[in-house]
Image: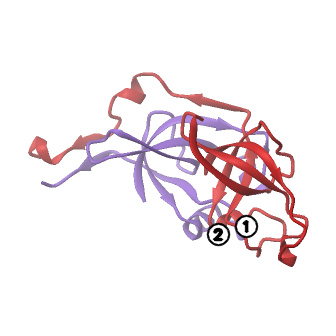
Chain colours: A purple, B red
Amino acid sequence: MYIGKVIGTVVATIKIDHLAKRKLLLVDMLDLEGNETGYYDIAVDVVQAGPGDTVLVIDEGNGARQVLDLDPGAIRAVIVGIVDEVSIAA
Amino acid sequence: MKFGRVVGTVVTTVKYDDLEGVKFLVVHVLDENQGPTGKFEIAADATEQAGPGELVFMVASREGSQALPEWFVPIDLAITGIVDEVEVETGPRRNEPTARWYSADEGD
């Protein structure tokens, strides 16, 4: 899992059935200081996240299929939480 | 999923049986701004509608094969959608923290 920032939305009319009616957001992974890293995913959102939100992202197929109730399911990246606070110990 | 730009097609005559009927495309893997990375891969087209020049997104690894109708097949990258539009956030919520963030050097 990683913490990312939602930096945009992706719209696609032609897509596989697993993605039908799902909201796709562009997320950029954050580093320990909260800065964007340039590593990104196009992720399915299940927590009503929106642009700018700091979010928790999984990038693993089995977890994604479980969350989305799909089998088979060709989805890996899913936004599963909106982050309120991050505290990095010294 | 990652962005990709379709740049070509691949034809194979001799292949593993389960790959029969699978359309392979050459894609340039793109960064988050849809800019070039210099990395090229071969992807199976699960939309069956992608073609050269198009901006697509792709799912990698085992999930790639699950995008195909016959999904227990040996591929590791599949095109799962054709991009109509990418709307990028550029306002203050992009540039300012949207979670309380306590780094080690701030002593908290």
Query: Visible in this render: residue A22?
Result: no
Q: CA distance from mark 2 to mark 1?
A: 7 Å
The amino acid sitting under disc 2 is Arg
Tell me if A32 is positioned left or right of A52 in this view: left
Which of the numbered marks, if any, corresponds to residue B62? 2
User: Which residue corresponds to the image point at 73% horizontal and 56% vertical from the top-left?
Assistant: B43
Give the answer, above or below, for where B67 lies relative to B50.
below
Q: Nearer the viewer, residue B79 or B91?
A: B79
Query: x and y percent of residue B53 in the render?
Result: 77, 36
Q: Determine which residue is flagged by label 1.
A: B66
User: Which residue corresponds to the image point at 85% horizontal and 58% vertical from the top-left?
Assistant: B23
Q: Quick one: SS at disc 2? A: helix
Subunit ID for the residue under disc 2: B
Give the answer, above or below, for where A89 lies relative to A85.
below
The amino acid sitting under disc 1 is Gln
User: Which residue corresponds to the image point at 73% horizontal and 52% vertical from the top-left?
Assistant: B80
Query: x and y percent of residue B33 in the render?
Result: 55, 33
Tell me if A75 is positioned left or right of A90 in this view: right
